[in-house]
Amino acid sequence: MDNYIKNQTLEHLTKAQNITIAVSQNSGFDGLAAGLALYLSTKKLGKNASILANPPTVEDAKMLYGVDKIGKPEGKQNLVVVVDNAVKNVEKVTYFLDEDRLRIVIHSFPGSKGTAKEDISYEETASKPDLIFVIGFNSINELRNEVTHEQIINPDTWTISINKNEMSQKFAQANVHEHQAASISEITATLIQNLALPVDEDIAFNLYSGISHATEMFSPSYSRPSSFEAALWLVKFGAGKASLAARATQQPSFASLEGQTYHAGSSITKVTSPPSEELTKKPAPPDMIDRQETQIEEVEVKEKSQEAWLKPPKIYRGSKSFDSES
C-alpha cells in the first residue's frame, strides 16, 4: 500500500460509521482470525462494525475472540417488508405520503387471491456500510457468491482487500496482498500496525493464533521471517496474556489422567494413582532371570530325552508307497 492509498484509507476510515468485514470461506481459520481481529479493532474505534463469515467449528471457536458476533449486524437497521407468493399475486407496489405517514399499496393481479395479512412479514437488514474489508477473496464473482447482502458490493464504497495472492479481478480501491507471506493474519497485523489501529490482548491473540495455525506452529517449512516479526510484535501487545492463551498452554495433570486407558501400539496401559507396592519393587537382574530360565530348560530336555529312549521309533508309512511291504 503506497502513501496515497494509505492516506485515502485513513480518511475514509475516520469518516466511516458503518464498517463491514467479509471473510471468504476458503481462507479458513487464518482468514477468520484476521477478520475477527479487524472487527474488534474497528469496534474499539467506536464504529458500528459487522462481520460476515462462516461460523467456525466448536474447537476453532474456543481459540478465537468475537465468534459470537459473526452475522450480527450492528448500528442502524433497515426495515424490509416481505410479501409471500408475490410472483402469483402482486402486480405492482406504489406508495404515497398521507401527512407524515407513508402508505405502501400492494396491487394484486386481476383474478388472483391477492395479498393477505398472513402473507406479510418484516425483517431487518444492516445499513449500507461506509467502508468494507474483504478478506481472502480473489474476484468479485467469488464475493457475490458468498455474500448475499447486495448493499456491500458497491463500487462507490471504499473497499480494502486483504489476501496473500493478487486478485484475478481488482474490485477494491485498496489492495493489500503479499504472496510471500505465510498467512493472512500476518498481513493483517502489518496493516493494523501501518494504520495505527487499536490493538489489545484479544486482538493480538487472534492474529497470533492465525499465524500459528497457518505455519503449523511456526514450522520452518511453512514460516517466513515476516511471520516471526509479526508474532514478536503481537506478543509485545499482550498476545500471551490473553485468557485463551493460558487455556491453550495448560497441561493436563496426573490426577486428570487417572482411570484413563491409553493405547501405544499393541500394548494397553491404564493410568492409576498412586502406584501399588508391587509396581515399585525392583525387578530381578537380567543374569539371574537367564540362569533361572536355563535351568528349567535343561531339566525339561533331560526328561524328554529319557522318555524318547524308552519308546520305539515312530515310522510313517504312506497309503500307497509301502503297500508291498505290508
Image: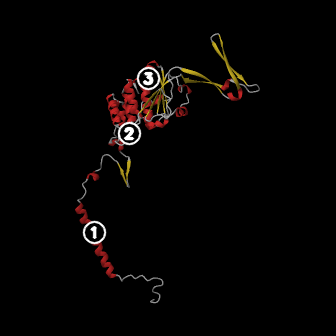
138 lies left or right of 279:
right
Give, as a three-letter code, the residue at label 2. Answer: Thr
Q: Look at the numbered disc 1 and give the secondary structure of its residue.
A: helix
Question: What residue is shown with label 3?
Answer: 9
Q: Look at the numbered disc 2 and give the secondary structure of its residue.
A: loop
Q: Position of residue 33 (x, y in %)?
A: 42, 33
Residue 199 visible in the shown view: no
Q: Could you give the CA–CA distance between mark 1 and mark 3, rounded to whole angstroms?
A: 88 Å
Q: Residue furthest top?
A: 99
Q: Could you give the CA–CA distance between mark 3 and mark 2, rounded to whole angstroms?
A: 29 Å
Give, as a three-letter code, the residue at label 1. Answer: Ile
Q: Position of residue 218 (x, y in %)?
A: 35, 39
The answer to whether residue 246 is above or below residue 283 is: above
Q: Position of residue 154 (x, y in %)?
A: 54, 25
- Find out whether the residues at labels 3 and 2 contact each other: C-beta distance under 8 Å: no
Question: What residue is shown with label 2?
Answer: 215
Q: What is the quadrant of residue 317 in the picture?
A: bottom left
> Which numbered circle lies on residue 243?
none
Question: What residue is shown with label 1?
Answer: 296
The answer to whether residue 197 is above or below residue 289 is: above
